[in-house]
Image: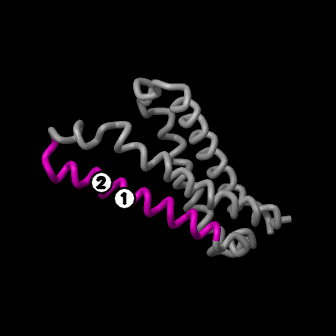
Amino acid sequence: MRAIFEPLIFIAGFCQLAVLIASALVPIRLKWKDDLQVLPKLHRQLYWIYGGYVVLGISSLGLICIFNAAELAQGSFLARSVCAYGAVFWGIRLSLQTILDVGPHLTTWWLKAGYHTLTLLFSSFTILFGLAVIWPA
C-alpha cells in the first residue's frame, strides 16, 4: 500500500527544486541590494547566509527525494524521520504564508499566480511527507 508514495516523493523532489526558481527571484523582486543597504554589513550578510541555508535545505531534501524515493516510501524509521523533517520544514513554511505581508509585492497576475502555486506546493509537500510518516506499513 505504501507503493503509492514512491512516485509522489520522486515528483515532489523535482517540485522542491522548482521552488528554488521562486527563491532566486526574492532578492531581485524585493530589491535586497538597495533596501538592505541601510543595515549594518553584518545584518546584510546574515540575510544572505539565512537565504543560503534555506536554499541548501530545499536542495538537499529535493535531491534526497529524487535519488531515494523508493527508500523513503518503504517507511523505515530513517525514512519516516526524513519525511517528518520534510513535513515540519514545509509545514512551517506553509504557516508563514498566513503572516507574511506579500500583498504590496504581488503587483502582476503572474506574481499572484506564482504565490498561489507556491502555497499549493507547500501544502502538498506538508501533506505528502506527513502521510508518509503516519501511513501504516
Q: Is residue 60 magenta?
A: yes
Q: Is residue 51 above or below residue 103?
A: below
Q: What colour-coding does the image apply?
A: one colour
Neighbor class of circle 1 (other Cα within 10 Å; few <14, some 14-19, many 20+) is few
Q: Main secondary structure of the magenta part?
A: helix
- How far is the residue under mark 1 from the one under mark 2? 6 Å
Q: Which residue is mark 2?
A: 48
| Label ID, residue 83 | none
Are dots 1 and 2 in contact, CB under 8 Å?
yes
Quarter containing the C terminus = bottom right
Q: Amino acid at mark 2?
A: Trp
The residue that label 1 is drawn on is: 52
Across and down, in percent, residue 126 comes to 62, 50
Amino acid carrying mark 1 in the image: Gly
Tell me, yes or no, whether the highlighted magenta stretch contains residue 61. yes
Residue 73: x %, y % from top left: 73, 68
* Magenta range: 39-66
Q: Residue at x 57, y 42 (%)?
A: 118
